[in-house]
């Protein structure tokens, strides 16, 4: 039996969002026969509400400020299976999705990271289901940041996820890191997991969305040499004074 660690980040601040996470868990459990694949599910819940324990898994309530990669790293430290999958909570898993990825890993051991095919996202971007594996590092193309399935051994090369990225650009940084270390990543087009497109983010107001997404681009571009240090510092200075002026 193959054991796969599934780490899901959730923000169940409402019944609707908790139902979204529960639907992800249920479709995951229904997707593979339990005598062949066992999912070790860890949900990391960031909502500051009364503790809500999700069924058929462990639920963790970190007592610290949210950071997407920080919480994923916490989940990685609390699990130890050879295969791990980092997931959003707005996913629907289809039968055989994990088996299809494991089979590709077995066929080509050089592929150490993969994403499944999303029927909503990938066809408009030019990808067709059941057309083998597309190798590459394109974000939202080969690298579907909402579902990243990889061999845990790659962390010995890449180190932990970049915690200075709090939310946005986490998948971009993951892709750049794989490419830097020549770790092959593929979109497995006969593995199906549908992404319901940032349902948690849609509940936030415009100011909160900007806070979550705006600053990340400047750091990402600085880290990967697309923006110089002084430009990055100037942005941080502007943000600092903007916060001082906010009532």
Image (cartoon, grey):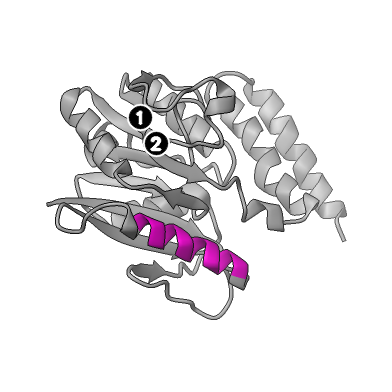
Residue at 65% x, 52% y: name it: 201
How many angstroms separate mark 2 from mark 1 (CA)?
Answer: 5 Å
Can residue 244 be found in the magenta stretch? no
Label 2: which secondary element: strand
Residue 52, image x, y percentages: 48, 77
Name of the residue lying farthest toward the left: 1
Quarter of the figure with residue 53: bottom left
Q: Going by the image, does 192 lie left or right of 229?
A: left
Q: Going by the image, does 150 lie left or right of 61?
A: left
Q: Is residue 163 visible?
A: no
Residue 108, image x, y percentages: 20, 22
Assess disc 1: are there few (<14), some (14-19) or many (≥20) residues with their C-alpha within 10 Å of its C-alpha: many
Name of the residue lying farthest toward the bottom: 50
- The residue indicated by pointer 1 is 188
Which disc is residue 116 wearing? 2
Q: Going by the image, does 230 lie left or right of 8?
A: right
Q: Tell me: residue 44, above or below residue 83.
A: below
Question: In terms of depth relative to the viewer, which is nearer, 174 or 5?
Answer: 5
């Amino acid at each position: 039996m193959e054991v796969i660690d599934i780490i899901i980040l959730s923000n169940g601040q409402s019944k609707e969002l908790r139902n979204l996470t529960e639907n992800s868990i249920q479709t995951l459990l229904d997707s593979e026969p339990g005598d062949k694949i066992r999912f070790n599910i860890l949900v990391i819940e960031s909502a500051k509400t009364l503790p809500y324990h999700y069924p058929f898994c462990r639920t963790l309530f970190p007592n610290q400020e949210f950071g997407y990669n920080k919480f994923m790293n916490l989940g990685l430290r609390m699990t130890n299976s050879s295969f791990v999958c980092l997931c959003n909570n707005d996913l629907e898993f289809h039968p055989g999705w994990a088996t299809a990825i494991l089979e590709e890993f077995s066929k080509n051991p050089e592929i150490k990271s993969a994403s499944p095919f999303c029927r909503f996202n990938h066809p408009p971007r030019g990808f067709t289901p059941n057309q083998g594996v597309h190798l590459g590092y394109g974000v939202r193309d080969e690298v579907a940041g909402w579902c990243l399935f990889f061999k845990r051994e790659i962390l010995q090369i890449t180190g932990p996820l970049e915690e200075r990225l709090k939310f946005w650009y986490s998948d971009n940084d993951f892709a750049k890191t794989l490419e830097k270390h020549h770790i092959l990543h593929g979109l497995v087009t006969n593995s199906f997991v549908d992404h319901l497109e940032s349902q948690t983010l849609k509940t936030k107001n415009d100011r909160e969305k900007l806070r979550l997404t705006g600053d990340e681009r400047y750091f990402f571009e600085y880290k990967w040499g697309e923006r110089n240090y002084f430009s990055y510092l100037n942005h941080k200075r502007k943000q600092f004074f903007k916060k001082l002026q906010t009532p």
